[in-house]
């Protein structure tokens, strides 16, 4: 048994984080470069083949798995990992080194970056398969492509890896709050494993949770908020939904239950599970003191508010019953 005015810190209300209060922009990765050439990208190479007539030749080329492209007249050139300007310079350098041109005019442009197909499910506005550029497949980009988080979203999400064993690549480290399964000591994600991430912790710490790969599934979990129960000397005892975007106080719960049913009711108990969910604490509250603001404690999901019977309430109830029965017995019977 605890009293409201001496409540220890570990029993203070723990209210779920509102998803609207999260600044998800902190999950943005400033190091992401969308113009970096990667295997699978489709490039366009334009060469001036005749300066007298200014004849040009534009050829689409696909970056092969080994990071090279086949340039007409020049041959294979390594471009993976380079920015577009660097890849263009690499083609020019190779064409001169191989004696194809003396002073070539060659341009390289990104026609279509390789797209990753990321499945976003759960509490988002537009669940489904989202296509993201390979070099910009971040968690934030996937959530934005899915229309953002819905009102039912919790701060918890799960990323399920969808790569096959031979396609496993080294991934950047995840947030400290992420729960990893199937990661080896080198930090490489294994197929079929999952990562659980708390967005509130990731935003607070400013840590980018992880990059996404083709075939990954992002599942945003819905909030499961237990109701608040009000029992005892109230007009309408029952369970009441915990508000999602504002705090709920002791007197608010009493009001939801229609108010007290006894004019002299004052003693109340807030029954709260401790953080380990194994034990229950009873917090004694005075209704009158709560009305003065001293003991109007903030509630947390799952709390039970009990308006207790006392000798005073029993006495008043007895008097009310006596007068009710006495008055009824004096009525003439027709």
Image (cartoon, rainbow, N blue to C red):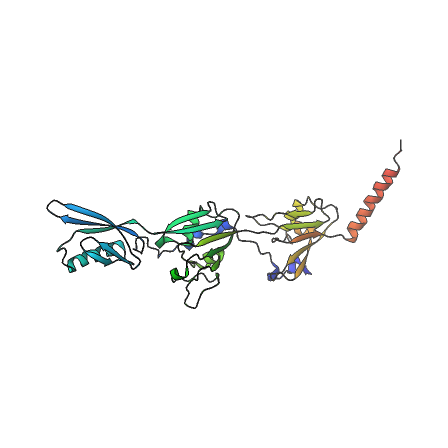
Question: Which quadrant of the view contains residue 205?
Answer: bottom left
Q: Is residue 97 above or below residue 19?
A: below
Instruction: Determine which quarter of the picture holds residue 13.
Output: bottom right
In the figure, is residue 188 to the left or right of 268? left
Image x and y of residue 75, in percent: 20, 56
Asked if one can make out residue 292 in the rendered structure from this viewpoint, the answer is: no
Q: Front-most of 258 and 92? A: 92
In front of the other: 278 or 114: 114
- Left or right: where 333 falls relative to 311: right
Q: Residue furthest bottom?
A: 185
The percent position of residue 92, horizontal first and vertical second, equals: 19, 56
Viewer-proximal residue among 129 and 198: 129
- The N terminus appears in which quarter of the rendering? bottom right
Q: Residue at x 66, y 53 (%)?
A: 304
Residue 330 x/y as whole percent: 89, 37
In the rendered image, residue 136, in percent from the top left (x then y), is placed at 36, 53
Residue sitting farthest toward the top: 334
Residue 304 visible in this rendered orientation of the protein: yes
Front one among 256 and 43: 43
From the viewer's perspective, is 15 left or right of 61? right
**Quadrant housing the C terminus:** top right
Q: Residue at x 68, y 49 (%)?
A: 230
């Amino acid at each position: 048994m605890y009293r409201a005015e001496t409540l220890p810190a570990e029993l203070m209300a723990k209210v779920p984080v509102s998803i609207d209060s999260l600044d998800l922009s902190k999950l943005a990765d400033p190091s992401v470069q969308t113009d970096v050439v990667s295997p699978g990208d489709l490039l366009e190479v334009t060469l001036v083949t005749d300066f007298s007539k200014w004849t040009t030749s534009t050829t689409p080329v696909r970056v092969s798995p080994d990071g090279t492209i086949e340039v007409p007249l020049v041959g294979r050139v390594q471009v993976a990992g380079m920015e577009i300007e660097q890849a263009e310079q690499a083609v020019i350098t190779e064409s001169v080194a191989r004696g194809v041109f003396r002073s070539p005019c060659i341009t390289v442009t990104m026609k279509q970056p390789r797209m990753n197909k990321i499945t976003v499910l759960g509490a988002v506005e537009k669940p489904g398969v989202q296509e993201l550029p390979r070099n910009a497949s971040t968690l934030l980009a996937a959530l934005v492509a899915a229309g953002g988080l819905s009102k039912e979203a919790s701060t918890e999400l799960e990323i399920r890896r969808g790569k096959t064993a031979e396609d496993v690549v080294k991934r950047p480290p995840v947030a400290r709050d992420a729960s990893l399964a199937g990661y080896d000591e080198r930090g490489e994600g294994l197929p079929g494993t999952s990562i659980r991430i708390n967005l509130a912790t990731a935003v607070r710490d400013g840590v980018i949770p992880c990059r996404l790969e083709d075939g990954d599934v992002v599942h945003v979990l819905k909030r499961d908020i237990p109701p608040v129960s009000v029992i005892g000397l109230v007009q309408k005892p029952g369970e009441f939904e915990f508000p999602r975007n504002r705090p709920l106080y002791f007197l608010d719960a009493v009001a939801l239950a229609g108010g007290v049913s006894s004019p002299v009711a004052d003693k109340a108990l807030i029954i709260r599970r401790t953080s380990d969910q194994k034990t229950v604490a009873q917090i004694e509250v005075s209704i009158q003191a709560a009305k003065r603001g001293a003991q109007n404690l903030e509630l947390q999901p799952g709390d039970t508010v009990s308006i207790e019977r006392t000798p005073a309430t029993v006495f008043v109830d007895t008097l009310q019953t006596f007068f009710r029965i006495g008055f009824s017995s004096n009525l003439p019977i027709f």
